[in-house]
């Protein structure tokens, strides 16, 4: 939210990548006739892609819960203000958390390049962070700081930060990748756009010499759309290109770095810079980027004052998720709450949870009561998923940047509990002999259970029960695997093991089956299939 001379608010860049074991496993997914062929597969019930049909049920969002220790990184240095954009990487071998975050000193900085910088902190537990005293970049007369990147000092401030750890890069000096927005000179002319830097350790960075690598659009509200013959002298007015925010992740399916972030769309009268929507660019090497494509815009059900601030994406459990930053310019200088969006292919995005935010702003007076800045780097732990975020006490498009409380915190969900399915309160259709209360069932599409040694459910059954049964691909029950023969599940667990009395999955003939989950006052979030070690994917 830095105000600049050309009359609009520069938003931000956040490029992130989180290559997790789960994402790599996701790349192995192969669907043939709806069969699941991975060694271990978890079906998330965030959508109905794997469900044939369900009766008497409803889907509910599982909002993320703030950590009681928030904020875990506070603004306590002279160069720190407006902490918002950030990225996190957890080393799977050591468990050490590395965090990079943007701070804005504004006019307090004596050098233009120091107005908006990237800082570094680290932690053993992801909660208690230290800021090392480095001698890389001084701030005014202070020689030791935790600043690891400064701006070029061009027309406007360098903005945003995202760090990608790429363990597969053959060049050890490029294992850490950063992307951000800055103004750079290319062939004698200055342009705003995507810039990148590389590092061997995440602390000492080398800017890539060519910049910008992707020229962004930058101008005044309601600027007329340029004519085709104005390309040469309206350098910064670029319709249908990315704006000044970047959120990159590694897509294990396409084997590309993909940036989902904000793109300006034109207004009702045709003028530029009306609202931000979701745009997309991709690169195989983090340097050469394809042309931008518009993916998703606010729709008829969104208030007229709402737009997408930026749209970080990550891949998990055979789904693409976006922590969409919903910017409402009509409230508090442009407040931001977080909506969870889902996609099967990264192109067709669904917004099934518009009625409730996945992560809402904090209570009035808290550091995160105004704007939340999500990223593409969730931290996947054994029993929970952490979502780190930066935050302002005020709005993202208006306010006092240099004096506004801000910081970094995180929120969590239990592992795989993005959303769940539960029975409706009452089913009383005329086709029922009597009304049913909190009873429902989910029938999955036919799939192969060849080599499957166990089925487990991530479910909250603390107030009821769940039974599971198997049906043929034509919908007939299988003797020995009916609901009545299933040992009922109870309690709240991330991994309830399903079992039947006197039978095992190994006894099933080699054909496809439908799994039916019977819910009685219970909520199920995910189903997992595990294969025998000797069975490999076909």
Image (tube, rainbow, N blue to C red):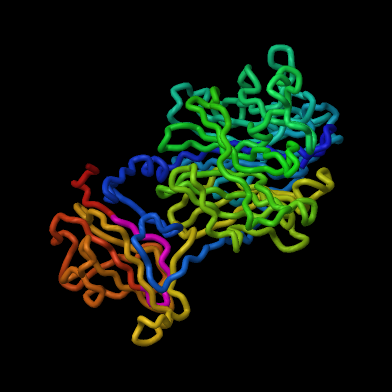
**Residue 242, quarter of picture:** top right
Q: What residue lies at 17% left-to-right and 64% top-to-bottom? A: 504
Identify which residue, 527 or 352, lies in the foreground. Answer: 352
Residue 218 shows in this picture: yes
Whether residue 350 sits left or right of residue 204 in the image: it is: left
Predominant SS along the magenta part: strand
Whether residue 462 sits left or right of residue 484 in the image: it is: right
Q: Is residue 347 above or below residue 423?
A: above
Q: What residue lies at 69% left-to-right and 16% top-to-bottom? A: 186
Which residue range is magenta in the image? 519-529
Horizontal and vertical percent position of residue 367: 74, 55
**Residue 93, quarter of picture:** top left
Horizontal and vertical percent position of residue 486: 25, 73
Horizontal and vertical percent position of residue 126: 57, 49
Q: What residue lies at 36% left-to-right and 60% top-to-bottom? A: 51
Q: Residue furthest top?
A: 187
Whether residue 523 sits left or right of residue 71 in the image: it is: left
* Location of the N terminus (image quadrant): top right
Residue 120 shows in this picture: no
Identify which residue, 153 or 149, lies in the foreground. Answer: 153
Whether residue 528 sits left or right of residue 146 in the image: it is: left
Horizontal and vertical percent position of residue 429: 41, 80
Q: Is residue 523 magenta?
A: yes
């Amino acid at each position: 939210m830095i105000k600049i001379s050309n009359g609009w608010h520069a938003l931000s860049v956040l490029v992130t990548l989180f290559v997790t074991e789960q994402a790599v496993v996701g790349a192995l997914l192969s669907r043939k006739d709806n069969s699941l062929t991975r060694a271990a597969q978890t079906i998330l019930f965030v959508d109905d892609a794997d469900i044939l049909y369900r009766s008497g049920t409803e889907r509910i969002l599982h909002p993320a819960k703030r950590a009681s220790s928030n904020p875990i990184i506070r603004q306590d240095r002279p160069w720190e203000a407006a902490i918002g954009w950030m990225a996190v990487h957890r080393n799977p071998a050591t468990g050490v958390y590395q965090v990079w975050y943007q701070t804005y000193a504004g006019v307090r900085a004596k050098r233009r390049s120091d107005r908006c910088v990237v800082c570094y902190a680290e932690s053993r537990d992801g909660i208690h962070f230290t800021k090392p005293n480095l001698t890389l970049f001084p701030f005014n007369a202070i020689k030791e700081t935790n600043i690891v990147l400064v701006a070029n000092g061009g027309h406007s401030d360098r903005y945003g930060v995202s760090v990608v750890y790429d363990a597969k890069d053959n060049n050890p000096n490029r294992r850490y990748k950063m992307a951000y927005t800055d103004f750079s000179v290319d062939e004698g002319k200055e342009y705003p756009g995507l810039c990148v830097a590389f590092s061997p350790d995440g602390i000492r960075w080398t800017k890539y010499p060519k910049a910008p690598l992707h020229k962004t659009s930058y101008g005044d509200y309601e600027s007329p759309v340029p004519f085709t013959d104005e390309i040469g002298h309206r350098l910064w007015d670029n319709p249908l290109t990315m704006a000044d925010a970047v959120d990159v992740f590694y897509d294990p399916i396409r084997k590309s770095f993909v940036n989902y972030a904000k793109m300006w769309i034109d207004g009702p009268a045709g003028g530029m810079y009306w609202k931000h929507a979701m745009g997309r660019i991709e690169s195989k090497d983090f340097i050469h980027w394809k042309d931008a494509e518009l993916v998703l815009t606010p729709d008829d059900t969104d208030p007229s004052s709402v737009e997408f601030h930026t749209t970080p994406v990550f891949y998990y459990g055979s789904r693409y998720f976006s922590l969409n930053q919903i910017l409402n310019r009509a409230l508090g200088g442009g407040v931001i709450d977080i909506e969870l969006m889902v996609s099967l292919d990264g192109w067709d995005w669904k917004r099934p949870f518009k009625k409730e935010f996945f992560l809402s702003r904090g209570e009035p007076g808290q550091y995160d009561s105004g704007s939340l800045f999500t990223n593409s780097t969730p931290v996947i732990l054994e029993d929970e998923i952490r979502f780190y975020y930066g935050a302002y006490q005020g709005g993202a498009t208006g306010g006092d940047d240099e004096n506004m409380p801000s910081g970094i915190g995180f929120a969590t969900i239990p592992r795989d509990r993005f959303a769940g399915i539960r029975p409706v309160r009452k089913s009383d259709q005329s086709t029922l002999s009597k009304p049913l209360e909190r009873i429902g069932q989910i029938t999955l599409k036919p799939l192969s259970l060849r080599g499957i040694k166990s089925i487990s459910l991530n479910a909250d059954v603390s107030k009821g029960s769940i039974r599971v049964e198997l049906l043929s691909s034509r919908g007939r029950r299988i003797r020995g695997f009916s609901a009545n023969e299933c040992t009922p599940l109870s309690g709240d667990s991330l991994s309830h093991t399903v079992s039947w009395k006197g039978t095992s999955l190994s006894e099933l003939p080699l054909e496809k089956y439908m799994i039916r989950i019977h819910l009685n006052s219970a909520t199920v979030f995910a189903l997992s299939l595990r294969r025998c070690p000797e069975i490999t994917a076909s």
